[in-house]
Amino acid sequence: MKKLLLSLFVVFFHVSFSYASLLVTPQRIETSVNPNVPIKASYSVTNNYDGDVTLEVSAEVSKDWSYKSNFDIPVDSWLKIMPSRVTIKKGETRLVLYTITANEKMQGSTVAKIKFKVNPPNSPSVNVLVTVPMHVIIRGTERIACSVDSLIVHKKTEERRLSITIRNSGNVLIHPIGAVNIYRGKTMIDSIKLYEGSSVFPESVSNEFSIQFPSHLQPGKYRAEASIVPVGYNHRIAPSTKSIEFRVLKDGSIVD
């Protein structure tokens, strides 16, 4: 199981990341690109050490997070980084430029691990490595297919919760959103939202989403229905649903 996220413009999600005295911005990039159309942007790297450092930057494809047909496409065939080695003075911020040019062999999405390595001035034998992901979706090659893989009622009184996992059978990174609706008969009595936050990588199953039961459920028979859809693709596919029935007893316990 793998690990646990249009028009012609590019969308970036930028976050800062620091390790000790090295600050890299952004921490994470998600972008959609057209084949053979170069996209240029940069990382910002700040040296907060007490002396100068030499920064080395490299990249490799993540086989845990990329679509399998992209595994053997060399990362340097579609990603150029400049400079790959540079000295950054104490307190200085330098830009590391990159160019993404997806080629026609690439399908779905691929993830590169961008590695920023320095040797601290006071510990030259120590390698400090900051690794940040770059998620690239090749526009026009996406295959979107996701479903509710499991919906489980946890019956112990002290838990009183539902769990849900989501299967991504497509070739792109997705961010699922949706809800678990609780019905008594035909009447919906509660709706628990699943908010975007976790990424489900191509051909993988998500980690478990845990949902607490509403505290107001009275003894009786209920049905829980999960409905999910990937963010950004809800206009292209219908939501995936899965239901499960359960009973709440007078002592608060839950049974099938």
Image (cartoon, grey):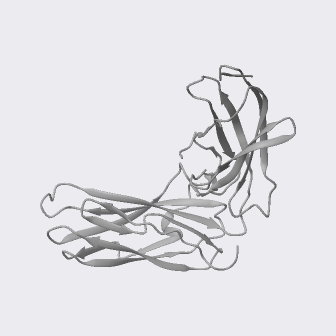
Residue under the image location 48 percent in, 68 percent down:
76
Q: Nearer the viewer, residue 216 or 55?
A: 216
Residue 67 horizontal/vertical position (percent): 62, 54
Q: Is residue 104 above or below residue 156?
A: below
The image shows residue 104 at horizontal and vertical percentages of: 66, 69
Quarter of the rendering occupied by the C terminus: top right
Q: Residue at the location (56% across, 56% down)?
A: 72
The answer to which of 126 and 200 lies nearer the viewer is 200
Residue 169 in view: no
Q: Answer with the quarter of the image where residue 24 lies.
A: bottom left
Q: Which quarter of the rendering shows the N terminus?
A: top right
Number of numbered discs: 0
Q: Measured along the vertical axis of the image, is residue 14 above or below residue 128? A: below
Q: Is residue 29 left or right of residue 137?
A: left
Where does residue 245 sit, x and y in percent of width and height? 78, 29
> In the image, what residue occupies the spot 80% across and 43% down?
188
Toward the right, the furthest residue is 186
Residue 51, quarter of the rendered image:
bottom left
Query: Relative to residue 189, is residue 24 drawn left or right?
Result: left
Q: Is residue 256 left or right of residue 106?
A: right
Could one spot residue 76 in this view of the protein?
A: yes
